[in-house]
Image (spheres, rainbow, N blue to C red):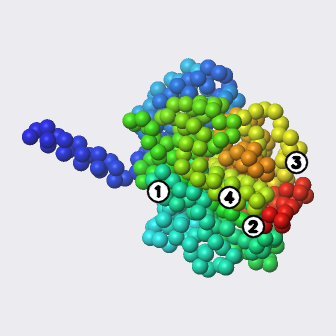
Amino acid sequence: MKYRECFIVILAVLALAAAEPHRFDNHRVYRLRVERDEQLQVLKSLKTGQNSYEYFDEPRQTGQEVDIIIPPTLQSEFETILKDKEFSAKLVINNLQDLVDRERPQSDDGEFGWDGFYSVDTINAWLYSLEEQYPEVTVIKGGSTYEGRDILGVNINRKPGQNPGIFIESQIHANEWIASSSTTWIINKLLTATEAEPGIKDIADNINWYIIPLINADGYEYTRNVYRMWRKTRSPFGLICNGVDPNRNWDVYWEKGGIGSSANMCDGSFAGPSAFSEVETRTLSEYILSIRDNLNFYIAFHSAANMLLFPWGHTPNPNVQYVQFNDIAESTVNVLKQRYGTEYTFGPVYSTIYPTTGISADWVHYTLGIPGFTYEFRYMNTLTGEVYGGLVPPEEIQPNAEEVLDSLVELVRKAKEYGYMDVDTSKK
């Protein structure tokens, strides 16, 4: 009887713990500069996960800046590590839970907006409402998830058979909430732009848009309901591990535990047991291939590093189209800066952020031959200087989306200059 009672108590405690998302009260975030290989190895050796250390993005190379989350129970240990290994560190967030609390909408009763970050069901219902409201909108299914959700988006096409196509993929990493929210804001603006906004109106009228706001739907719901910092998919591996980093799982220079990824199934950058092992990446790639004749450009939205990236990630050798890609990126980030002063760096993935393999934009460029660009959205409020990393307050959704949309107008203009937006009507 005693054991049964204890078992019931344990189940009750577990149920209570599962009722609310994991909290980050008094968790601090520090930005570290990795200057030596010894420092890099120390950071890689730290245990990560709930109630332990955690990274916004994992340490991969010297010269990198890393944002690390420190729970109060490990503060003393962390300070010892800083001293012993002579890290250059800056406190950027004093209490992470404050940011987590600010992310939540006032309610999520099915009414969609940009005052918070909404559930998958609410986002999808909004997408279907657009199809009912606008004749140029068709809801598209870009794939499916391990837990059986549809990966939905919209095709906005005001001149069927005439317009060049751009595909936008957003929030393939579960914890990057600002990506999907900014994408839905951009969708709404493309549909409602007036003649008083000629640049936006032009790309709304003259581009065939395929836009999927939320690729990693399972992981996103897990971040909402269980653990905010979750990054991967939710497929099971072994007895205690779940998920693959879906932006390391594409079949482009993929290798198990290759550069920029991990072979350890519990790590946040686990690349999976094989390329396209995840239903999310496999079905999305199949959808992209099904519309390949309609596509001229591919864009992925991520957060948060203030960067615009282009191929390649697997090699330091320049892409054969480096000059064109670099010119497009430079013009694009210059326009992005004009509205709020947000500064992006730009360049190849390998040298600008870190070496990596198996990423979607590289796969599209390799497989379809079209440009594949990746945005890493702003990590701070440009006007106030407040640093939030990937945990973005909802009042930042619109400013981020506005400057990104400004930049897309310029990206399209420059891409046209280089002939990337030419339309082969024989394939339509």
Q: Looking at numbered disc 3 in the image, what kind of residue is underneath it?
A: Gln
User: What residue appears at the point 76 percent right and 73 percent down from the top-left corner?
Assistant: 160
Instruction: Tell me what residue is drawn at x 88 percent, y 48 percent.
Output: 324
- The quadrant in which residue 405 appears is bottom right
Amino acid on which disc 4 is placed: Ser
Which secondary structure, mark 2? strand
Location of mark 3 (residue): 324
Could you tell me how far apart the alpha carbons at marks 2 and 1 are, in whole angstroms? 28 Å
Residue 219's spot in the image, x, y percent?
Answer: 50, 50
Q: Decide if residue 196 is on the left or right side of residue 43.
A: right
The picture places residue 306, in percent across and down from the top left corner, at: 71, 47
Q: Tell me the residue that label 2 is attached to.
A: 208
Distance, label 3 to label 2, CA atoms, is 22 Å
Disc 1 residue type?
Gly
Q: Nearer the viewer, residue 75 or 162?
A: 162
Residue position marked by numbered label 1 in the rendering: 148
Earlier-in-chain disc, 3 versus 4: 4
Where the C terminus falls, by quadrant? bottom right
Residue at the farthest left position? 1
Which tag, 3 or 1, sits closer to the chain's start? 1
Q: Mark 2 belongs to which amino acid?
A: Asn
- Using a 10 Å C-alpha cutoff, classify the residue at mark 4 as few (fewer than 14 neighbours), some (14 to 19) or many (20 or more): few
**Residue 261's spot in the image, x, y percent?**
60, 34
Residue 33 visible (yes or no): no
The label shown at residue 290 is 4
Label 1 sits on a secondary structure element that is loop
Is there a contact, CB below 8 Å, between mark 2 and mark 1?
no
The mark lying in front, picked from 4 and 2, is 4
Residue drawn 51% across and 37% down? 54
Secondary structure, mark 4, is helix
